[in-house]
Image (cartoon, helix red, strand yellow):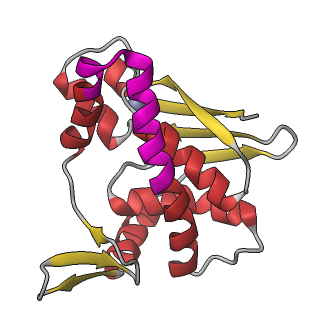
Amino acid sequence: MALTPEDVDRDFKQVFALVHHDRQDGFLRWEDAPDPLMLVWSPRIFEFLQVMENTISFSPARGICREVGYGSGHEGALRSLQAMGVESESPVDALLMLPRILAGSGWGASAVEYDDATSRVTWTFPNGTSVGVAAERAGPRADPACAFFEGFGAGWVKGSLGLAVEFVETACRGRGEPQCLFESRPLG
Ligand SMILES: [Zn+2]
């Protein structure tokens, strides 16, 4: 399922219509989520990975980014499905909300494919993720930049399909490739 520009526009309006501002505490909140919502520039999110790469060896840095993304994706799936009115009895519909919520949130337009014979999920950002584009602007790198998204996608798959997978980013704008591509592998 590929998003049209009209879909992206509609989802942007729908996602941001659920944001409200509290003039007392100065926080944004989304729908009835208790946690404040922050708008953060994508280069700052990429800096998490860069800082960790500079302080610990590469694999643990990706793992930590993935873990933060996982929590966000898992909670995001459960909360978004409720807020956007997707029936929880339809796990695949819930999975397919992932591109709509993310393009609506400004993370980048993507397409998700689910093969129910193999339970594999392929998730493609034809123009890269927002973080991948920030990484490309920071200069060429040898490794993919979007570990946060790897975790986010795995969390979303768990929150929608109930499947335990990990995503591996096999192409990345941050590495000079035209798109960011994530492929799932079963866990356990
Ligand atoms: Zn990427």
Task: Specify whether residue 5 is in view.
Answer: no
Q: Residue at x 32, y 56 (%)?
A: 106
Q: Residue at x 73, y 64 (%)?
A: 91
Q: Quadrant of residue 26?
A: bottom left
In this view, 89 is above or below 154: below
In this view, 140 is above or below 73: above
Task: Out of 182 and 9, give the one closest to the viewer.
Answer: 182
Picture coordinates of residue 60, whole percent (x, y): 43, 24
Residue at the right extreme of this rendering? 117
In this view, 75 is above or below 23: above
Q: Quadrant of residue 104?
A: bottom left
Picture coordinates of residue 62, whole percent (x, y): 42, 28
Picture coordinates of residue 111, whole percent (x, y): 55, 47
Taking the image as shown, residue 179 lies to the left or right of residue 156, namely left
Q: Main secondary structure of the magenta part?
A: helix
Q: Which residues are magenta?
A: 52-72
Q: Quadrant of ligand 1?
A: top left
Task: Specify whether residue 70 is in view.
Answer: yes
Task: Out of 88 and 75, give the one closest to the viewer.
Answer: 75
Taking the image as shown, residue 36 lies to the left or right of residue 167, namely left
